[in-house]
Image (spheres, rainbow, N blue to C red):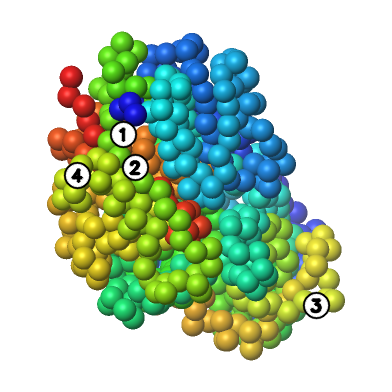
């Protein structure tokens, strides 16, 4: 797509300075290692392949979350969202999950979505925790606004972190809004946020060189299970 | 009383079956069992259905007569049996009694539950309806809560450790990963759920000292079997008949607080004693067992209460590998409730089905207990207040 940089200077939202997320590695329940790292706009086309199958999965609100993540990734790729970041979880290079968020202001974060591609391993819980870690510890924000679009999300975020309801509207459609404060984050950190740094070079090399995506069929099976028999 | 044989078995994969109704699942499993027996849809005298929650979860009653009609088995007699998580075992027991008495010749027993159409919270609440409505349920007790308290007492009294529970979870999920009927098809490692500091998130506390991987999943599923007099088996089927050599059933107090020793699962002991007595067998004669591991602690506690191991020795046996496939007494080779899943009304039937497959020597090498001749099941209702135990024996032809 041709880009007119003169117009872009008008269309693109101005951005605040944004600290990078230092990658970490997490040992999963099955003993495999998941690398969690920040990706760049150049990775978006590959990530979209991972998200696309979820648009058509009418289960656990995957279609709602998938469609929104898909749009948010494209909007980020074309500089239409202010201060967005995207983290991925990769196991042997394979995308296991994606989370994103953005800076609403230098001190207030806006959690966007958490999409677990591989299920049953608490990938979503780990990636959501990484997202909160990024906002509070690396972006040095005071609070993060959060909504849940599924019962699983409500359990994982609102209940497990003890989030506080807030009247500040979240930009994801007006659902009841909650916030994670620095105090709540550090209160929960020891039981919800894990990971080792630095990531061993061999694992990092695989993650960076092989941002691979499972087949559409495999993704559907991972999410919806194999029990349609 | 006539000897009773299992001549056909069927199961559908457990898990989350959004596309199927409860009746669909019961019908699929029943047709598999009838086909396995070689009966088709002819000649069934009576049908017993084990189910705990259709009235609550599906707002449906009279499911046994509905199933008879669905299967075109009219005018077979039909009854649904509700006995908490022991509903499946109770249905099998009633089927066995019906054939043993001489009143019916061919009886179909099915068990099924559809639990995933409600959230996990609602499912937990549904299961908690088996607790005492005045002195337990109103105070928020759940089955995981009971299991947690039981585990703490068992640890204090018998030296049970978390490591022992972890080994049960790993063993059963490993076997589940090999079982095409299992709900959970994922292997886990000791590092991932116990040793690594990251396990605090992977395997969080659920009901202290029990953690996430100590509990069975909430499942949809169904299983079925066909019973007939042993003397008729050869005429009706080509399958190796499996004799219901013995069974036992016992109850204990409804509330845990009324038990002299809450760690003593008296109903398990009594049900097993009755079954062994009727089968004229001893615990050391059993080659494979399916125990009701709704929580990992229960596999260990039941293995002691049925007499496989002395009190306090069950956990050590797990650590020593005695209960793995290839060990001295393989337990829950199917993956158990922990991995095969626990659609409550189906479980007691599924346990018998799995043992029948073992005794017919029909399973793949990586799941078959070599030359198994005798098997045992324990279906545990409530928190041990209603227990059904079966002993099955391969009949050489």
The reply to whether the C-beta atoms of the residues labelled 2 and 4 are less than 8 Å apart is no
Q: Nearer the viewer, residue B353 or A57?
A: B353
Question: How many C-alpha atoms fall within 10 Å of the one at disc 1: few (<14), some, or many (≥20)?
Answer: many
Q: CA gap, disc 3 to disc 4? A: 66 Å
Give the label on residue B281, or none: 4
Point out the image quarter for the N terminus of chain A.
top right
Q: Earlier in the sequence, mark 1 or mark 4?
A: 1
Between circles 3 and 2, the one closer to the viewer is: 2
Between disc 2 and disc 4, whose residue precedes?
2
Name the secondary structure under disc 1.
strand
Residue on which the image places disc 2: B247
Q: Which residue is mark 3?
A: A166
Image quadrant where residue B161 sits: bottom left
Q: Are marks 2 and 1 in contact (CB under 8 Å)?
A: yes
What is the CA distance from the residue labelled 1 to the residue labelled 3? 62 Å
| Mark 1, residue position | B244
């Amino acid at each position: 797509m041709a880009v007119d940089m003169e117009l872009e200077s008008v269309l693109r939202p101005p951005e605040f300075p944004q600290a990078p997320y230092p990658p970490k590695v997490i040992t999963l329940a099955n003993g495999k290692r998941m690398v969690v790292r920040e990706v760049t706009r150049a990775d978006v086309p590959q990530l979209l392949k991972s998200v696309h199958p979820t648009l058509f999965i009418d289960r656990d609100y995957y279609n709602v979350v998938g469609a929104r993540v898909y749009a948010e990734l494209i909007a980020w790729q074309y500089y239409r969202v202010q201060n967005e970041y995207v983290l991925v979880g990769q196991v042997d290079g394979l995308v296991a999950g994606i989370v994103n968020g953005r800076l609403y202001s230098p001190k207030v974060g806006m959690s966007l979505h958490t999409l677990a591609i591989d299920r049953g391993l608490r990938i979503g819980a780990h990636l959501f925790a990484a997202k909160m870690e990024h906002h509070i510890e690396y972006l040095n924000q005071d609070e993060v606004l959060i909504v849940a679009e599924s019962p699983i999300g409500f359990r994982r975020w609102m209940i497990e972190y003890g989030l506080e309801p807030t009247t500040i509207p979240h930009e994801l459609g007006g659902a009841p809004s909650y916030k994670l404060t620095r105090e709540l984050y550090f209160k929960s950190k020891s039981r919800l946020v894990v990971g080792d740094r630095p990531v061993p070079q061999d694992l990092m090399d695989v993650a960076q060189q092989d941002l691979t995506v499972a087949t559409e069929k495999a993704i559907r099976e991972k999410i919806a299970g194999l029990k349609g028999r | 009383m006539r000897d009773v044989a299992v001549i056909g078995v069927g199961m559908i994969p457990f898990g989350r079956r959004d596309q199927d109704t409860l009746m669909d699942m019961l019908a699929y499993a029943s047709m598999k069992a009838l086909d396995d027996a070689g009966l088709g849809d002819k000649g069934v005298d009576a049908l017993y259905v084990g189910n705990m929650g259709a009235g609550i979860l599906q707002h449906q009653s009279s499911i046994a007569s509905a199933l008879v009609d669905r299967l075109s088995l009219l005018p077979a007699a039909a009854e649904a049996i509700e006995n908490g998580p022991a509903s499946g075992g109770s249905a099998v027991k009633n089927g066995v009694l019906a054939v043993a008495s001489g009143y019916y010749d061919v009886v179909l027993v099915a068990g099924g539950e559809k639990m995933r159409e409600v959230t996990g919270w609602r499912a937990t609440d549904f299961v908690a309806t088996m607790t005492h409505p005045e002195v337990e349920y109103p105070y928020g007790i759940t089955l995981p809560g009971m299991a947690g308290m039981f585990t703490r007492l068992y640890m204090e009294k018998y030296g049970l450790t978390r490591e022992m529970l972890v080994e049960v979870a790993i063993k059963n999920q490993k076997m589940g990963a090999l079982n095409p009927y299992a709900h959970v098809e994922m292997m886990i490692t000791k590092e991932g759920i116990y040793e690594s500091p990251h396990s605090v998130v992977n395997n969080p506390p659920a009901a202290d000292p029990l953690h996430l991987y100590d509990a069975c999943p909430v499942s949809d599923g169904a299983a079925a079997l066909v019973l007939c007099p042993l003397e008729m088996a050869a005429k009706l089927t080509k399958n190796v008949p499996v004799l219901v050599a013995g069974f036992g059933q016992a109850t204990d107090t409804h509330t845990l607080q009324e038990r002299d020793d809450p760690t003593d699962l008296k109903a398990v002991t009594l049900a097993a004693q009755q079954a062994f007595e009727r089968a004229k067998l001893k615990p050391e004669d059993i080659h494979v067992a399916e125990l009701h591991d709704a929580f990992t602690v229960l596999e260990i506690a039941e293995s002691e209460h049925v007499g496989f191991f002395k009190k306090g020795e069950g956990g050590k046996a797990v650590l020593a590998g005695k209960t793995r496939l290839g060990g001295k007494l393989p337990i829950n080779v199917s993956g158990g409730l922990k991995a095969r899943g626990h659609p409550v009304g189906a479980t007691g039937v599924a346990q018998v089905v799995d043992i029948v497959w073992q005794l017919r020597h029909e399973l793949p090498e990586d799941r078959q207990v070599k030359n198994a001749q005798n098997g045992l099941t324990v279906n545990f209702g409530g928190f041990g207040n209603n227990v059904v135990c079966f002993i099955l024996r391969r009949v050489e032809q």
